[in-house]
Image (spheres, grey):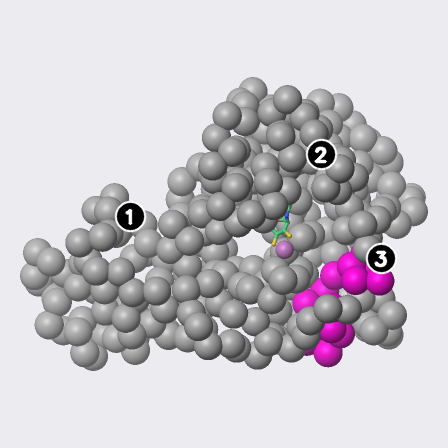
Amino acid sequence: MLIRKPDDIEPSEITPERDYVNRRAFLKMAGGVGALAAGSALAPRLLRSALVADGPPEDTPNTWDQITSYNNYYEFGTDKADPKANAQQLRTSPWSVEVAGLCRKPGHYALDDLFRSVTRVDRVYRLRCVEAWSMVVPWNGYVLGDVLRRLEPEPGAKYVQFTTLYDPQQMPGQRRPILQWPYVEGLRMDEAMHPLALLVTGLYGKPLPKQDGAPVRLVVPWKYGFKGIKAIVKIEFVEQQPTTTWMRAWPEAYGFYANVNPTVDHPQWTQSVERRIGEWRRRPTQMFNGYGDQVASLYAGMDLRKNF
Ligand SMILES: Nc1nc2c(c(=O)[nH]1)N[C@H]1C(S)=C(S)[C@@H](COP(=O)(O)O)O[C@H]1N2
Ligand SMILES: [Mo]
């Protein structure tokens, strides 16, 4: 892990981050430093530094700084630091999402209306980028299926397509043909309805930073990170499998399904291992990014080497 001295930690981030540290990490540490720290005014700091230094392996969330300064968002540049530097001028309010296609409630929705009477959820998920790095992110948002159901998809709706804002004035990357703009993504309807899939509006209990996809992005934890389309302005219910930005760019490398699969390599590198941001050692990549117990049945009978 990246080890930060307690002095480097903003007091404001201690409480929220500590709340998200997972239970296993807490238990592991509780017998040691925890006892020492208990009752001391310094307890939160000691607690946090102990967790960072001794941190467990699996699913300790990455820090706010890591999650918000190491980004992929080509609309704002192709270097990892570019989105944070270049996205801050994006106007994210007011914002509306167009709902179109095969459903009974099409229209232009303000975000509040899109999420009206949908329960907010907090979920700590692994994010596995196709570039073989990963992070753990405490997201806040809404179960995608809960939102979609309220839009009353029609029986002919077999897929959902998502579209990012197209505005080259605000998104400098769109002035260059890095990708075909706007960025588009899609899910099969049963994938979209799976309870792990989220529309995300926050992280660490704070509004979603612009570089992470404000005001609303998709998060599908068993798929490669590129499925997590940012700054969504359109949701369309369609009958045929829609195209996606990365399929268009390089179909041999990026399929529609994009399920994390350590046995199907990228043409230029292995997908069998990954590096967690903040660590040096490489860890094995897990099938479906470790969510197979929950999602494997969606793909029963499919050849996942062909449908990669
Ligand atoms: N509109 C849009 N969405 C996007 C991207 C992008 O370039 N444009 N990059 C994707 C990729 S490759 C990844 S790994 C994730 C990264 O999300 P993060 O920057 O919040 O970690 O966003 C995805 N969503
Ligand atoms: Mo990615």
Residue in view at x 69 percent, y 56 percent: 194
The answer to whether 111 appears left or right of 265 in the picture is left
Q: Earlier in the sequence, mark 3 or mark 2?
A: 2
Secondary element type, mark 2: loop
Q: Quadrant of residue 91?
A: top right
Q: Amino acid at mark 1?
A: Glu
Q: CA distance from mark 3 to mark 2?
A: 21 Å
Q: Amino acid at mark 3?
A: Pro
Q: Position of residue 236 (x, y in %)?
A: 80, 36
Would you say residue 208 sits in the magenta stretch?
Answer: no
Which quadrant, please, contains the C terminus?
A: bottom right
Which quadrant, please, contains the N terminus?
A: bottom left
**Which circle, 3 or 2, is nearer the viewer?**
2
Q: CA distance from mark 1 to mark 3?
A: 41 Å
Q: Earlier in the sequence, mark 1 or mark 3?
A: 1
Q: CA distance from mark 1 to mark 2?
A: 37 Å
Residue in view at x 42 percent, y 69 percent: 279
Q: Which mark is residue 251?
A: 3
Q: Amino acid at mark 2?
A: Arg
Q: Which residue is mark 1?
A: 13
Residue in view at x 73 percent, y 78 percent: 263
Q: Quadrant of residue 216?
A: top right
Secondary element type, mark 1: helix
> Mark 1 and 3 residues: CB-CB less than 8 Å, in contact?
no
Q: Residues within 10 Å of mark 1 (few under 14, many from 20)?
A: few
Residue 122 seen from this side: no
Q: Position of residue 64 (x, y in %)?
A: 38, 50
Q: Position of residue 172 (x, y in %)?
A: 62, 30
**Which circle, 1 or 3, is nearer the viewer?**
3
- Magenta residues, as a range? 252-266
